[in-house]
Image (cartoon, rainbow, N blue to C red):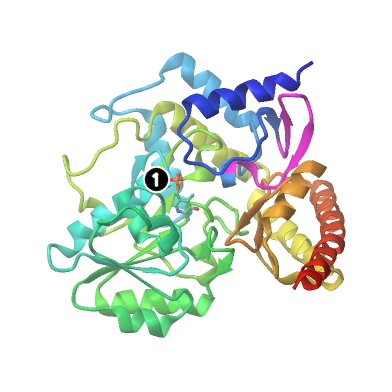
Amino acid sequence: MTRSRSTNTIGLYDRYVMPTYTKTPLVIERARGSTVWDAEGVRYLDMFPGWGVSGVGHCPPRVAQAVARQVKRLMHVSNNYFHAAQALLAQRLSERAFDGKVFFSNSGAEANEAAIKLTRKFGGPDRYEILTTENSFHGRTLATVTATGQPKYQAGFDPLVPGFRSVPFNDLEAMRRAVTHQTGAILVEPVQGEGGIQIAAVEYLRGLRQLCDARDLLLIVDEVQTGLGRTGRWFAYQHAGIVPDVMTLAKTLGGGIPIGATVVARPNADLMGPGTHASTFGGSPVACAAALAVIETIERGRLVERAARLGRYAVDRLQALQRRHRIIRAVRGLGLMLAVELSVDGRPIVEACRKEGLLINCTQERVLRLLPALTVTQAELARALKMLDEVLASRAGRSGLRRRAERAVR
Ligand SMILES: *Cc1c(COP(=O)(O)O)cnc(C)c1O
């Protein structure tokens, strides 16, 4: 009966939507918290909600309510005028991060793009270069994909934007050696998300701060994935007790409504004067109302502390899995940013999990990534890890068989 609903939708995509994404044949119709339902009414436990966008869960009630209220009063104002929500949101972000000013946009890439242009203003024509790290991820616009230290994302898009170089992550000496008289900034994720949940050492971040101070460079932290409580702090750089010059945010910030933010510390907060940068939709009343409600949701639910606590629980349980499954090579986590590194391709495991009703992600081919909503319950986490356990158990048997078969062929 309803089987055709998914098939129809997928058929329309095939014909009319550009095929830029690797897709999973799952048409999602409805979601709440950490649960989603497909077009046939089948239920899934979502441990990777919206690639981190639905950080306070799908359709968070306070956010849904704030958006509903806002769309009836005022949906859009050009940035040549003022509106209260943008002012309040800038204040709330600055109070929770560091004293500074905010530029609002619509996505992570756009937030980083503003940081890149700010660096050009900061360094002038001679100090335009931005040092980034290998395996980083900063977005898919031409400049941010150049900043992204992964050739696979850059292939086919030459000529790239000049002025970026990437060096090994968590290697302070490599960064120090890379700085030249042309360097204007260092751009780094406190935890590389797409790179496989690689966690920056506290000493690394402190060292970068010192290096930037010594060489008069901007320290830009990309917190698009790590920001807003995800790692058990409001912002992941806070684990290191440092203050960056620039921080970029998106994903969780809007609770599902597109918004990006570039937070710039004084004294550089006024480097971009009137006319130097813009984004027509940036910081719209609806997006800002949503983000204010996200912040309220995080605070009322004490979700930052909760992410830290549930993250410790999850890592414990994942380490127990590691003792049972030889294909798990490592377990990493900071708050609710979790990774299970395998010795085999993780994509068939993600697919097997989906068939069992569990949504997770695989990055860097062998790293299973979980970014559960900060509102996830311990029972949901336990259920998800049990499903993963079962899938790994059945896959281990199967891949063992396949290996034996391959050997027999050779
Ligand atoms: C997702 C992500 C981006 C890009 O965000 P978009 O909203 O897709 O442009 C940039 N940096 C990091 C660390 C991300 O995880």
Q: Name the residue under label 1.
A: 261
Could you say which quadrant of the image residue 376 lies in? Answer: top right
- Assess whether residue 48 is covered by the magenta stretch: yes
Q: In this view, does 324 lie to the left or right of 168?
A: right
Residue at the image position 79 percent from the left and 51 percent from the top? 381
State the extent of the magenta-drawn residues as a range: 33-50
- Which quarter of the figure is the C terminus placed in? bottom right
Q: Is residue 99 visible?
A: no
Q: Quadrant of the N terminus?
A: top right
| Of residues 215 and 199, the one drawn nearer to the viewer in this rendering | 199
Residue 182, compared with residue 396, is above or below; it is below
390 sits left or right of 253 in the view = right
Left or right, 107 with respect to 47, comes to left
Residue at 20% x, 53% y is: 271
Label 1: element kind: strand
Which residue of the protein is positioned furthest toward the left in this rendering? 125
